[in-house]
Image: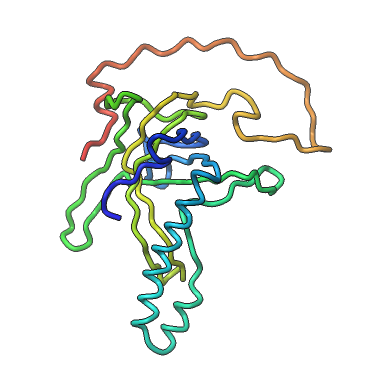
Amino acid sequence: MNKNQVIPAPGTAPALVRWGGVIKPDRYGNFYVDVELTPEQAEPLIEEYQSRAKKVLDEAIAEAKGIKKKALAEYREQLPIKPDYDQEGEPTGKYRMVAKLNAAWESKKTGASGTNSVLVCDATGQVLRGVDVGWNSEVYVSVKTRPYIHDASEKYGVKMELVGVQIISLGDTRPQDAASAGFGVVEGGFQGQPVAAPAEETPAPAASAAEAESGDADY
């Protein structure tokens, strides 16, 4: 699929951000968003991706010969949307989708290199600078997808590349309590004394327009 795909589908409820960073790459050099999807949002996508990935695998098996043909038939499916589980390993009934984008790129053919950036816009479509996706933000995610076969890991599936994020409701970039951090209650574990809520922090002075722009890597 060459054109961008918006998830969840426009006109439906936005997805809930669980983790993410679209301004600064993580330690692996990726921008990413990790969102929660309902079964109604996720299952049609899973079916679509499974069909596309299986088609590519079947074509490869048809063209292969001997040991390679047998090996391909044993490859494991890998999709970017998976069931969600709670702290005790029980299914929550929802799904998680992770979309990533390499912050830097290099062409193996030409040796050319450069940087990538993620488009971030508000509910009206206005492009934002210096605004990250916070915890519990409600968003639509634009991605590009393509089927793949990876011989080294013996996997096949659909690769998802992050293109942009539309923020419908901006959440907090830092969890404020155990529940918002994703922690549940573990019976029989350590129980300390409650502590008073920390004093409200004084925000740092707003960065200048030039400083804000310098933090973004453009195509």
Query: Residue sitting at 36 percent across and 31 percent down?
Result: 166
Q: Position of residue 55 (x, y in %)?
A: 39, 69
State whether residue 81 is above or below residue 218. below
Residue situated furthest right in the rendering: 188
Residue situated furthest front in the rendering: 11
Which image quarter holds the N terminus? bottom left
Residue situated furthest bottom in the rendering: 66
Q: Position of residue 112 (x, y in %)?
A: 17, 54
State whether residue 125 is above or below residue 10. above
Query: Residue sitting at 43 percent across and 43 percent down?
Result: 27
| 30 on left or right of 198 | left
* Front residue of this view, candidates 118 and 195: 118
**Residue 124 is drawn in which quadrant?**
top left
Q: How has the structure been colored for display?
A: rainbow
| 172 on left or right of 114 | right
Q: Position of residue 188 (x, y in %)?
A: 84, 38
Query: Residue sitting at 41 percent across and 46 percent down?
Result: 99
* Front residue of this view, candidates 109 and 182: 182
| 12 on left or right of 210 | right
Q: Position of residue 89 (x, y in %)?
A: 69, 49
**Residue 31 is drawn in which quadrant?**
top left
**Residue 211 is drawn in which quadrant?**
top left
